[in-house]
Amino acid sequence: MAVEDSSDVNLTSDDNNSSSNGPLELYYWYTSFYSRKVLFALHEKHLSYKSNIVNLGKGDQYQPWYLKLNPRGEVPVLKDGMKVIPDSGRILDYLEDNFSNGNTPRLMPEKGTEGTQHVKQWRELLDSVPVPWITFGCLYHSHLTTNMKISSFERKQRLSLMSTVSTDLDLMMEKYPEFKELYQEKKQRFEILRSDIQDVDKIKAALDNLETTLDTVEQELASHDGDKSSWWLCSQKFAIPDITLALVLQRLHDLGLSTRYLTVDKRPHLVQYFKKVQEREGYKKTIGHGAGLLHKICCSKKTHLAAIGVAATVISVIAIGAVVYKRVK
């Protein structure tokens, strides 16, 4: 289950094969990992869309106008005419089911075709990487990283703001009592997560588990010879697992973890893969030139409400404690 999973919110039409009722609209935030997954897919499919920025730094995701769109208060959300689709995983599936013909390439093999199960297994493995958990764990425990692309001042500012989230959510309850239950739930989950992420041993365990996952990726890439020499991660064509892997590698780079995970002597095929994927137009358009990790997540305004935005991705993490990694068979 994705960290911003909204699978319990039934906002979509049951007819996934119907045609678009209007221009696609994407509600997202620039540096949100899960927003980027959808942006990457849209660029790869050459689909036009209307941008609707949900400023996590200002707490837009908890404002009434957005909660009416997605009661979980999480990004991204896709609108296709009257249809509203939350959760990055569900959005990617929707795009595959409805926009995969003509000049719009598929990012997953057609169901029942050769290689479908293999690509699906890789997608599940990479989706299990707890990116927000690792991200904010490294912000708390910067000694676990080297050459982080976030300045010490910015990091301290974000962590300081995060300490006021509970108070801010209390204020939101008073201001918008109709959403009190949602704010209470977010507050409870955040308090547990903040305690959990501050546990350095748990963060170390998550980073160790990631070593195992990336070793599996390296082995897969190393196996591509002969007719498979030009393959991406798990198929000849660029696919959803490639999107996720590319963004995971980018996040590790921005967190200052490249020297641990991305070195030629340790994972040469993965290093080469990352260089290759960085040349794709979809990657360039998604990451943007000169955009640093979480550069805008921390508020442009120094208000208490901004703390909610800083912790937005953390609050929604549901896998607390041990991180379970599924192995690729």
Image (cartoon, rainbow, N blue to C red):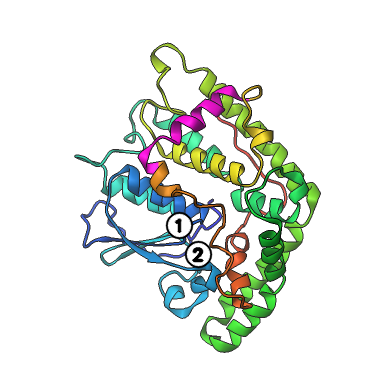
Q: In the rendering, at what x and y percent does residue 120 appear? A: 45, 36
* Depicted 301 relative to depicted 211: above or below: below
Q: Amino acid at mark 2?
A: Glu
Q: Which residue is mark 2?
A: 74
Q: In the rendering, at what x and y percent does residue 206 appear? A: 70, 44
Q: In the rendering, at what x and y percent does residue 28 appear? A: 43, 61
User: Does the CB distance between marks 2 and 1 fall below 8 Å?
Assistant: yes
Task: Return the residue found at the far top.
Answer: 226
Quick one: label 2, few (<14), some, or many (20+) residues within 10 Å? many
Residue 187 lies left or right of residue 64; in this view the side is right
Q: What type of secondary structure mainly makes up the magenta span?
A: helix
Residue 291 lies left or right of residue 45; in this view the side is right
Residue 43 visible in rendering: yes
Q: Which residue is mark 1?
A: 87
**Span highlighted in magenta in the image:** 267-282
Q: In the rendering, at what x and y percent does residue 35 appear? A: 46, 55
Viewer-nearest residue: 150 or 112: 150
Q: Amino acid at mark 1?
A: Asp
* Depicted 321 relative to depicted 225: above or below: below
Viewer-nearest residue: 311 or 183: 311
Residue 299 appears in which quarter of the rendering? bottom right
270 inside magenta stretch: yes
Instruction: Point out the tag, 2 or 1, that comes first from the N-terminus.
Output: 2
Q: Quadrant of the C terminus?
A: top right
Residue at 45% across / 41% down in the picture?
243
Residue at 20% across / 55% down in the picture?
19
